[in-house]
Image (tube, rainbow, N blue to C red):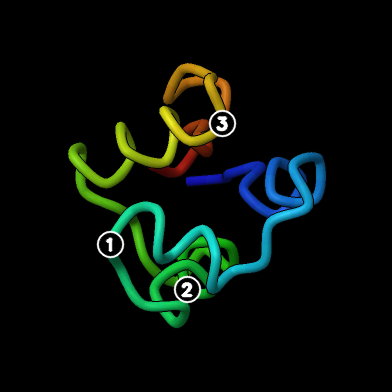
Amino acid sequence: MKNTLKVERAILNLTQSELAKKVNVSRQTINSIENGKYIPSTVLSLKISEVFSKTVNDIFTLDNDD
């Protein structure tokens, strides 16, 4: 799964820690999502999409091998 989380954070000038606080996870979780090491739950994906006022599909996309 690919994501644009890092780009979206940069647009809003949010650090990983700030985003983590907004969605109630650790900074390490945000880092792992950005690096493709962790696939967020549906609930977490929805929380993240609300922060950026975008749809989940705008932020997260499937790879061919997903």
Disc 1 versus disc 2: distance between alpha carbons? 15 Å
Q: Quadrant of residue 31?
A: bottom right
Callout 1 amino acid: Asn
Q: Is residue 10 left or right of residue 45?
A: right
Q: Circle 2: is it few (<14), some (14-19), or many (20+) Cα within 10 Å?
A: some
Of 45 and 23, which appears nearest the observer? 23
* Secondary-structure class at tag 1: loop
The residue that appears at 53% across and 19% down in the rendered structure is 54
Task: Please identify, in this view, whether the residue under mark 1 or under mark 2 is nearer the observer.
Answer: 1
Q: Circle 3: is it few (<14), some (14-19), or many (20+) Cα within 10 Å?
A: some
The residue beneath circle 1 is 24
Disc 2 versus disc 3: distance between alpha carbons? 18 Å
The residue that appears at 74% across and 42% down in the rendered structure is 12
Are dots 3 and 1 in contact, CB under 8 Å?
Answer: no
The residue beneath circle 2 is 32
Q: Is residue 43 left or right of residue 62?
A: left
Question: Which corner quadrant holds the C terminus?
Answer: top left
Callout 3 amino acid: Phe
The residue beneath circle 3 is 52
The residue that appears at 28% across and 62% down in the rendered structure is 24
Residue 63, image x, y percentages:
52, 38
Residue 56, image x, y percentages:
42, 25
